[in-house]
Amino acid sequence: MKLPEGIQVIERGWLSSNNVVLHARTGAVVVDSGYGAHVAQTLALLERVLAGKKLARLVNTHCHSDHMGGNAAIQKKYGCRTSVPDGEAPLIDRWDEQALILAIADQRAERFRYDDTFRDGDTLRMGGYDWRVIAAPGHDTHAVMFHSPEARVLISGDAFWENGFGVVFPQLFGRDTALAETRATLEAIGRLEVDVVIPGHGRPFGDAGAALERAFYRLEGYEEDITRLARHCAKVMLSFALLEKRSMPLAELPAYVARVPILAELNSRYLRMTPAAMAEWLVNELERAGAVRRNDGMLYAAGN
Amino acid sequence: MNQDTRPGGDVPSPCNNVCRMNPDTGLCEGCFRTLDEIAAWSAMSDAEKRAVLAQLPARRTLR
Ligand SMILES: [Zn+2]
């Protein structure tokens, strides 16, 4: 996919989000910083891509561990201005492990500071283009997207992917508006002039209309049957944890699904299995999807 | 947060989420690509991506 002048995407896998580098003579901007465990490679990649130029600013589409996990290290190295969506600011101020989906999902991120915030309707000058900030609640209530009408590019974070969107949490911890928000966000995307979408994970893609159709189809499935969403959510949370850990003893899995709050809550609210049955079901499902394999009492992330 | 689908593309990315450079080989310990290859991946043509993939098996032995 050919991107407009000055826009570069560092694409890795699922544990680290894409890093979008917006080049400008006045200093580059990077959108999202990847997962904490990958930060040494992230810094090396940025150094290579910036080629001695200054990193002026770091911004986040939203503050999940795979998008802001490199923030602290990037700030330390470059001393760059850091900007976050205004809705995330109070969560970062108090480092809310629940709202930031950290400890409750067995994820980690190094605490960072921010210098300022932006909100829906603002315009940010980044990499020689004006980017309009668009609220993108759903996967994360406080998430935003960046749209450049001039470049006709949408940086969509986890609100919109080539095949769907980042996992939406069913009613958990008292929040139950996520599906309605997701629908509104997809509808808002449908009203934008876009030639290229740069998603938070996966390759940049062109046919936003076809991708929107796939996203709506998926959304309808969840709207029809919320337990479908709960099952999907449980699978995503375990496979993400496994990507970080690389492997886990199968025998420890029942205790793990009982201990990690988000998995335990999904189970008690929707799945209603014993921890052993939930663990067994998860492994079977993820194995069938090709996301994990088991060998000699261990569960491995695919490709490991 | 993620894992809805594999990253798209006709040529799948070899990234397996290890994302750690080996200082001796200058290659990622997970996918055996160089920093330049990882950084440029997204902008490569399918033919260029396939050319990178073709080199990876031999690099594994450098481990
Ligand atoms: Zn996310």
Image (cartoon, coloured by chain):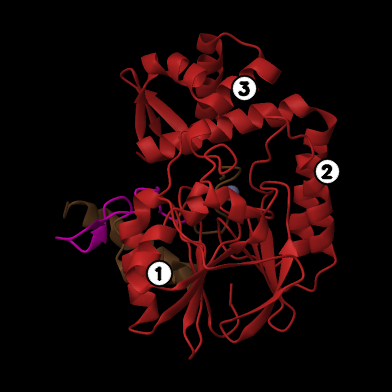
Residue topped by disc 3: A265
Q: Chain of mark 1?
A: B
- Label 3: which secondary element: helix
Residue topped by disc 2: A180
Horizontally, is A177 left or right of B26 in the view?
Answer: right
The quadrant of the image that shows the C terminus of chain A is top left
In this picture, is A28 found above or below A267? below
Q: Position of residue A23 (x, y in %)?
A: 50, 82
Look at label 2 and name its amino acid. Answer: Ala
Q: Position of residue B1 (x, y in %)?
A: 56, 45
Tell if the residue under mark 2 belongs to the same chain as the one under mark 3.
Answer: yes
Q: Residue at x 64, y 23 (%)?
A: A266
Q: Position of residue A79 (x, y in %)?
A: 38, 72
Q: Which chain's colour is red?
A: A
- Magenta segment: B13-31
Tell if the residue under mark 1 belongs to the same chain as the one under mark 3.
Answer: no
Look at label 3 and name its amino acid. Answer: Glu
A246 or A39, nearer to the observer? A39
Horizontally, is A76 left or right of A266 in the view?
Answer: left
